[in-house]
Amino acid sequence: MSTKKTYYETKAKALINVLKNHNFDPYYCDCIDDAKKLIINLLGSNKVISHGGSMTLMDNDFYECLEKNGNEIINRFDYKTPEEQKELKKKEVTADAYFTSCNALTMEGEIINIDGLSNRVSAIMYGPDEVYIVVGMNKVVPNREIGLSRASNVAAVQNAIRLNTGTPCTKGGRCFNCLDEHTICCNIVITRYSRIKNRIKIILVGEELGY
Ligand code: SF4
């Protein structure tokens, strides 16, 4: 096994114990394919599913597999007007299960996310009975301070570049805490505990995934 894999496994083992104390339901998978198989088993069938456009899970085969198991996937691009988009986003946050990643996960057991429209952080906080957060070990950081910096200066900047927002970070390569109308950073959310035990399932993956 490579040194990096051993490092990820060692870190994940320690983190899993911490996450359990926060009422989360954590798992570790060696690779994204194993993570997908695990999710398919945990999820089961007859559920309405939505997702936050995670770059980690953007894979038609995966969603097709969930559909073949008798689940319904809400198509997040199935709208033509702003009104239809609003209705679709409301439907997403009341699905049975929600899939997303996060912008940072701390060794202290806190999940950190930044959101623009904020339907993604809404679904994590309240609504779906099950939330699946798939996290590459590259997003695991020691503490809240470093996690907040990672979320702004690493994850949000790359998402802003991907979405071509034209915000200051897309030119300067770091967060300028902008108030630009196109900012993707309206809400910065720290999820530190789940009132409902095991509602939030955290799938750690021993690979570098997403931003
Ligand atoms: S500069 Fe603005 S859009 Fe870019 S990461 Fe910072 S707050 Fe977000």
Image: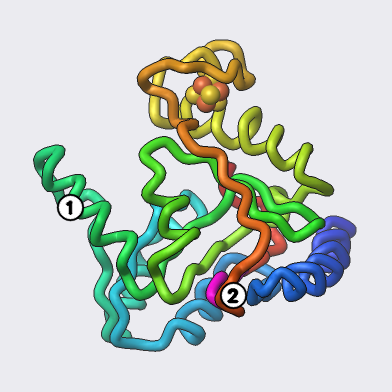
Name the mark nearer the viewer: 1 or 2.
1
Secondary element at tag 1 = helix
Secondary element at tag 2 = helix
Nearest to N terminus: mark 1 or mark 2: 2
Q: From mark 1 to mark 2, how far is it between C-alphas?
A: 34 Å
When the figure is inspected, residue 75 is found, relative to residue 131, above or below; the finding is above
Disc 2 Cβ-to-ligand 1 distance below 8 Å: no
Q: Position of residue 9 (x, y in %)?
A: 82, 67
Residue occupied by mark 1:
87
Report the predominant secondary structure element of the magenta stretch: strand
- Relative depth, front residue between 43 and 94: 94
Instruction: Report the magenta residues as a range.
Output: 198-202
Look at label 1 and name its amino acid.
Answer: Glu
Look at label 2 and name its amino acid.
Answer: Asp
- Relative depth, front residue between 37 and 150: 150
- Residue at the image point whose x is 59% and y is 42% from the top: 211
For this view, does 43 lie left or right of residue 27?
left
Q: Residues within 10 Å of mark 1 (few under 14, many from 20)?
A: few
Residue 34 numbered tag? 2
- Residue at the image point whose x is 44% and y is 31% from the top: 184
